[in-house]
Each structure stands twice: as C-alpha cells, then as structure tokens.
Image (tube, grey):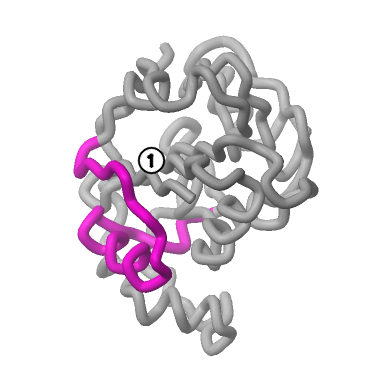
Amino acid sequence: MKFQESTLAHQLLDNLTGIEIGGAAHNSFNLPRCANVDYTDDMETVFKQGEFKLCGEKLPVDYVAEGDHLPFPDESFDYVISSHVLEHFFDPIKAVKEWLRVIKHGGYVFMIVPRKDALETETRPCTTLKELLDRHEGRLHPDDVVMDGGHQVSAVTGLPLCERWHWSVWYLEDFLPVCEHFGWRVVHSAERDDKVHNGWTVVIQK
C-alpha cells in the first residue's frame, strides 16, 4: 500500500530541485528532482521496516544527516519538504530555521504534520509556542518535557520509536502562531493535508 501523492506539492515543486527530510517509500511525494535526507542509511530501522511492511520497498537515502543540521551551503535548494517528520525534533524551531537556511530566496519549506486527533494514543495537550521557545532558547531540555500520554509507537510497525518519538503535538491553529512569531511567510495552509489526510499542511516561502 502506498499513500497518494500530493497535488499541491506537484503544483509547487515539480519544476524545482530540493530535498526531502525523512522520505519513505510508502509515503512518497514522487517529485522528479528531490533527494532524500535521513539520519541514517541503515535499512533495518523501525521506519524502514515499516516502509517494507506497507509497500514492499524501502526508499534509498541519498544524504545521511540530522534533519536539523544539514551539510549543505546556504541557499542550495529550491525547497525542503517533509511529511510526518517535524514532530520528531525536540526543537522544531531549529529544524525549520535550518530548512529555511538551505533554500534560495523565493523557495519553499513544505510540511505535513500529523493532527493531534490522528494519533489515538496521544493524550498530551497541544504544544504551545512558549514551550517551543523555551526548548529553542535552552530553558527546557529533553528530560524536562513530559512524555506521559505521548505518541511513542510507530504507526506502521507498532514498535517503540525510542529517541525518535513525537516530542510535539499540534493542530494547525497551534503552529501558525509559531510562524507569525518568527515572521515566516505562510503562503498555504490547510487543516487537512491532501496526501495521507491525517495531518495539517503549512507551506512557508522564503
């Protein structure tokens, strides 16, 4: 089984060159000039096992790097795209800033992020702007974040996510104030994505 492709992503990005953070075979955007960046090229991680279980293949990794610390010069690409990835960063502000760094002026950061109500095991309150700022500015550390009631199991394998669990949980209305705070220019947003249909979408243009 593979999820459908995103019409919006094709409309915006088909003629551009970019990278995907944490791409997966079962959830492919199938963009023609897009390289996959992942934290490891180990094909036996929980996530890669899940890809194979769902669709019988695993998306190759083109660059090994942490998604919030990319090995590319400033303004290297036209876009950065991700689906169900941002919530895995302890400091998502750092991640988005890094994605904006590596795209050219006029380029896009395209994100699909799971809605809180898509995660049956998630009982935490939505992550606030204040908490995100406290994490980003060093007032909160991973050991300070309450994970009880958090979504810590892979939806595709049923296995624990370990250190790659969901640090944050949002609806679109919770994340837009983050964009406003940093002056990130949102050119498209949707409470329900056009791909997996269990997330929200934000597109930022640099």
> Is residue 66 left or right of 10 when viewed as pictured?
right
Q: On the picture, is 66 further left or further right than 170?
A: right
151 vs 85: above or below: below
Left or right of 66 in this view: 106: left
Circle 1 Cα neighbour tier, 10 Å, few/some/many (<14 / 14–19 / ≥20) = many
- Name which residue lies at 73% across and 28% down: 61
Residue 84, position in %: x, y?
44, 41
- Residue extent of the magenta highlight: 165-192
* The stretch drawn in magenta includes residue 189: yes
Q: Secondary structure at mark 1?
A: strand
Residue 140, above or below 169? below
Horizontally, is 112 left or right of 17 in the view?
left
Question: Percent position (x, y) of residue 116?
Answer: 26, 53
Amino acid under disc 1: Ile
Q: Residue at x 75, y 40 (%)?
A: 40
Question: Is residue 53 among the parts visible in the rendering?
Answer: no
**Between residues 132 and 123, which one lies in front from this camera angle?**
132
Q: Could you tell me which quadrant the N terminus lies in? A: top left
At 22% from the left edge and 41% from the top edge, which residue is drawn? 190
**Going by the picture, which residue comes out furthest to the front?**
105
Judge whether residue 183 can be spotted in this image: yes
Image quadrant where residue 203 sits: top left
- The residue identified by callout 1 is 112
Residue 124 coordinates in the image, percent (x, y): 29, 67
Q: Quadrant of residue 33 in the image?
A: top right
Residue 108 position within the rendered picture, expressed as x and y whole percent measured from the top left: 48, 41
